[in-house]
Amino acid sequence: MKKQIISGVQPSGILTLGNYLGALRNWVKIQDEEEYECKFFVADLHSITVSQNPENLRNNIKSIVMQYIASGIDPEKNTIFIQSHVHEHSELAWLLNNYTYIGELNRMTQFKDKSKKQENVKVGLFDYPVLMAADILLYDADYVPVGEDQRQHLEITRDIAQRFNSTYNKEIFKIPEALITKSTARIMSLQDPTKKMSKSDENKDGFISLLDPREVIEKKVKRAVTDSENVIKYSDEKPGIKNLINIYSAVTDKNIEEIEKEFEGVGYGKFKQAVAGAIADTLEPIQAKYNELALPENNEYIENICRKGAEVAQKIAKEKLKEVQEAIGFITK
Ligand code: ATP
Ligand code: LTN
């Protein structure tokens, strides 16, 4: 039996370099390992926990699927689907709500951060981690490859699963584990290196998008907030430079010492040019593939992938949901 992997990204915009290095790139690595079976979905149900324009949302959902494939996710090897196409996600989330405490949801830092930005805080935003637990538990996932910001959501998923299992004294749910790659777990904003890089940041200079052209990448990196020391040194006291070194290391596969040596005696200007160039080189092939997938004649190809993916996912999800309903005491059809 292969180890089961599941992960997703919200279609709240174009993926950032943070999403790519923290999540997508690890998915691509995992898909090549024989012992894993992977499912990657577009978390559209999650994205409406903050307001979305319908036209943009529609475009973003398809665009995320294309960005997955352009980043190297092979649709032949993996199941790719759109979350709302498998209604069992919403249904299990409702059931799990009854095994989740308000107190534990209140502790979620993502909720605390995002609710500050909503005038009337939505129930959906509060309930987000329960839907995420449903996404994971439906598929008996062993591992969930995500960035550091999702660790807390994985912990609550484990708690909910354990609570459910012990309520019915039966191993209905597998207890999943987060899979987080330390060096790229938290890529920081270029404008505020104490904050994570995020695709919904209203300051566009804070993030590099997967589809940014080379000139834009150069401009954003040049503007990146650093200190005034002008020395390329990896240190917690220099969060801006530390972040750029982390990014450079991730896109070139060089280690920190090598990088410090490479830029010894060189100022921030030269270093930033090198970082921007290395990022652009990494993103170039992804952008070329994306542009090809975005051609109208490939629309059907993308739709077929999603349709087939939803079928595969739903077969599994349906069975798990039934098991849950029976454990609770519902009469199933
Ligand atoms: P939003 O701004 O809409 O909240 P986001 O950019 O934070 O979105 P998500 O869709 O929430 O992105 O995250 C998708 C995946 O990317 C998750 O696995 C998440 O942990 C990871 N991720 C997001 N931002 C970063 C980051 N700055 N560094 C590393 N990983 C990240
Ligand atoms: N909350 C995640 C997206 C997400 C997810 C999931 C990730 C929704 N459901 C299940 C892994 C497994 C985020 O990145 N914000």
Image (tube, helix red, strand yellow):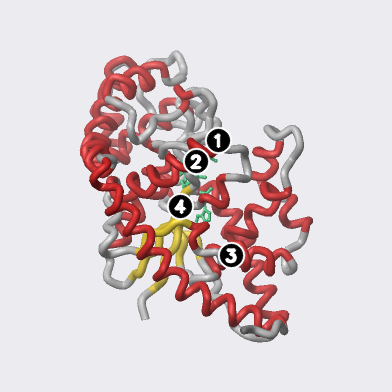
Which mark sits nearer the N-terminus, 2 or 4? Answer: 4
Name the residue: 27% across, 57% down.
74
Give the number of the mark in front: 3 or 2.
2
Q: Are marks 4 and 3 in contact (CB under 8 Å)?
A: no
Give the number of the mark in front: 2 or 4.
2
Which mark sits nearer the N-terminus, 1 or 3? Answer: 1
Residue assigned mark 2: 57
Side of 81 relative to 87 (left or right): left
Side of 178 relative to 38 (left or right): right
Tell me the element at label 4.
strand
Which mark sits nearer the N-terminus, 1 or 4? Answer: 4
179 or 266: nearer the viewer: 179
259 or 113: nearer the viewer: 113
Q: CA distance from mark 1 to mark 4?
A: 17 Å
Count of labels in the image: 4
Residue 274 occupies which quadrant of the picture? top left
Residue assigned mark 4: 42
Give the number of the mark in front: 4 or 3.
4
Tell me the element at label 3.
helix
Q: CA distance from mark 1 to mark 3?
A: 25 Å
Q: CA distance from mark 1 to mark 2?
A: 6 Å
Amino acid type, mark 4: Val
Name the residue: 31% across, 15% down.
269
Residue assigned mark 1: 53
